[in-house]
Amino acid sequence: MLIIAERINATRRRIGRAIEERDAGLLEREVRIQAEAGADFIDVNAASDPAREIDDLRWAVEVVQRSTDLPLCLDSSDPEALRAGLELIEGDVVMLNSVTGEPDKMQQVIPLAAESGARLVALTMDGRGLPDTAERRVDIAAKLIEAAQSAGIERGRLFVDPCIQPISTSVEQALAVLSAVFRIMQAFPGAHTTCGLSNISFGLPNRPLINRTYLGCLIAAGLDSAILDPTAGEVMDVVRAAEALAGRDDFCMNYIRAMRERL
Amino acid sequence: MLIIAERINATRRRIGRAIEERDAGLLEREVRIQAEAGADFIDVNAASDPAREIDDLRWAVEVVQRSTDLPLCLDSSDPEALRAGLELIEGDVVMLNSVTGEPDKMQQVIPLAAESGARLVALTMDGRGLPDTAERRVDIAAKLIEAAQSAGIERGRLFVDPCIQPISTSVEQALAVLSAVFRIMQAFPGAHTTCGLSNISFGLPNRPLINRTYLGCLIAAGLDSAILDPTAGEVMDVVRAAEALAGRDDFCMNYIRAMRERL
């Protein structure tokens, strides 16, 4: 399970202010606690103000990069911001978050990933509104995977995100996304699936409970990556438990080790 | 979600001793805490010693029945014990746990349920070893449902139990049971599914974490009943969260109410 740690996101007020005020110490602390909690990638989103995003992202990338050996996940809907962030990356592992099935996004972002060797989060949306069935998500995933492969990006670098929607507004969407994850993992061996987990609980009380309960279901359905806050309550325990349940932890050794380390 | 509360089971040492010593107060307390935690049925198992089981079960049934308005679930692999327990039941709702697909068990237990109007837990095992695939579980379920219907037991009284096995011994069985639950709920509309949840975590540390993580997955797959300890940590919170995720809680109202009641 590949964990993309989401806390450094400028749409969160505390992080947005820290980026605006160039408070490197706060970002370094956010990197450290997420790394200690089990992050594999550190997501960096600096999109609080489109007019400043490229400058802010450059600053944040430099701060985060010098404070950790973990690879970064550059997070922007603006292909130019992704390009600007990529120019600063020093290691050979990086992720771009994200491309969508919209033609202009595919044309701009897929070449960035192809040229840089970056891993790529691919959202199953295509400009005709959010997908509302498993079928549409699988169809858009197929289009994205084909376009990426045509550009030389192998499936193993693709992380298909089936666009979780809040159950508070559309009660049948959680099962639709579970079904999409299952079908995408069956239909496109080698490709990964990921998701912005916390979207599921928007507007509800005790969001961590909904988030981690759903994460267990998603992992059982085949999900092998998630964009989440690894410091949130019990979520990493659920990752270990669900991987054992999904048959991805021989003799449950990782689970047993994780539980022993906590005691 | 129908919760069959499992704590009154004589194979647990404390309960076995209380039954042997005719300690009614301890059983009454077990009933009360399970009722308060959200039980719908109180399981009563008195099978610590086959030579005493029928006497022990009669005593336990009388104690439990006079201490709660909740219906009982009579739990024995011995059809004669089930018959003896049934004779003492005063209300018109009761569950029998369980029948299997073994011919002699079907011949003895199905008539008991048919005549008494009892709900019936039907284990998908048939004497040829524990089922190891989803297919075998579905096949045995079909046989049990057909036999029950021939005897006049409608599907709504049947609770098919696909026989959870510990992931510590067979790492692929958790997904096989999830698949079986999904297929049984699709193939036999009206029938219920249930499971002895805690079997999944036998031999592992932090069993409640494995149990509740798996329960969320099972509910998303369609499970609508479970045999579990409703007082165990966060398990009933996971039931509420998973029912919302499975689209069985309009506008998430039950979830929101449950979270507010806790605060």
Image: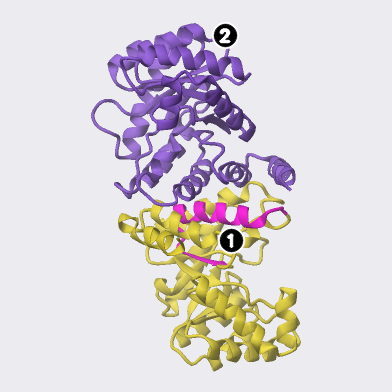
Chain colours: A yellow, B purple
Q: Which residues are the magenta region?
A: A204-228
Could you tell whether B173 is left or right of A73 in the image? left
Residue bearing the label numbered 1: A233
Residue B38 occupies quadrant: top right
Figure check: A17 above or below B51: below
Q: CA distance from mark 1 to mark 2?
A: 46 Å
At 62% from the left and 57% from the top, the residue drawn is A208
The percent coordinates of residue B202 (x first, y second) are: 37, 43
Residue bearing the label numbered 2: B90
At 42% from the left and 9% from the top, the residue drawn is B83
**Residue kind at label 2, given as amino acid type:** Glu
Q: Secondary structure at mark 2?
A: loop
Q: Secondary structure at mark 1?
A: loop
Residue B188 visible within the image: yes
Front residue of A35 and B48 = B48
Callouts 1 and 2 on one subunit: no
Front residue of B101 and B45 = B45
Front residue of B184 and B80 = B80
Callout 1: 10 Å neighbours few (<14), some, many (20+)?
A: few
Could you tell whether A162 is left or right of B211 in the image? right
The percent coordinates of residue B239 (x first, y second) are: 58, 41
